[in-house]
Amino acid sequence: MDALGPFLRDLFVPGTSLAEKIVRPVAVYIFLVIILRVGGRRELGQMNAFDLVVLLTLSNAVQNAIIGDDNSLIGGFIGGGTLVILNLVVVRFLYRHPKLESQIEGQPITLVKDGRLLQANLAHELITTDELMAAIHRQGVTRIDDCAEVILETSGTVSVIPRSPTPMEGTLSDIAARLERLETALETIARSNSATVSDRGTAS
């Protein structure tokens, strides 16, 4: 039992004060919100391999800042609970103040309009054409020409609004309509020729 004492103490007794366990997660939360906004929306949604490496190392870098010199369960519970509660408070506050939320998160950005790339917006968000095409393909659209709009949302996700009908569908529909008109015209000519031949037979 004596040997079990230090083990239980290390497991359940926080190594730092309660105030420090709360202040650390709050400070790290604020820092991460700011740094991710500075980094741009691609850090939130449209990540490439380099962005993923940054996020993974970033989480490791702030780990000690959150827990401090404390490996106890209770300390971890306090830190984790503080982050969840803080985020809940922030989300509720921003929900009730949409103007402030808009200032913090910014506005959606249009990347494609009527099948045309908006290169200035792509360059501003550091999104390449290949990355944009990959996002479009994930939503079942094969070509940029088939997009009425492609929007980079404030969350970092890409929303694709396809044309209806797509240019290809419009072309096929036009061809089908022309073939139908041609078929109707041929039937009319055939009936006319048949009537002419019948009239000649009657006259003779």
Image (cartoon, rainbow, N blue to C red):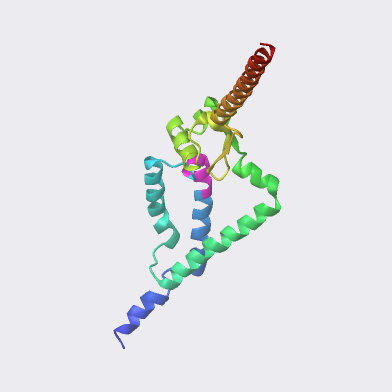
Magenta residue check for 169: no
The quadrant of the picture occupied by the C terminus is top right
In this view of the protein, which residue sits in the foreground, 158 or 127?
158
Q: Residue at x 51, y 42 (%)?
A: 139
Residue 146: image x %, image y %?
54, 31
Q: Residue at x 34, y 83 (%)?
A: 5
* Above or below, comparing residue 49 to residue 23 in the picture: above
The residue at the far left in this view is 3
The rendered magenta stretch, by its main secondary structure, is classed as helix
Would residue 183 appear left or right of 68 to someone viewing this image?
A: right
Residue 138: image x %, image y %?
47, 42
The quadrant of the picture occupied by the N terminus is bottom left
* Above or below, comparing residue 13 to residue 161 in the picture: below
Would residue 3 appear left or right of 172 to someone viewing this image?
A: left
Q: Residue at x 49, y 31 (%)?
A: 143
Q: Which residues are magenta?
A: 33-43
In this view of the protein, which residue sits in the foreground, 69 or 88?
88
In this view of the protein, which residue sits in the foreground, 201 or 159?
201
Would residue 201 appear left or right of 18 to someone viewing this image?
A: right
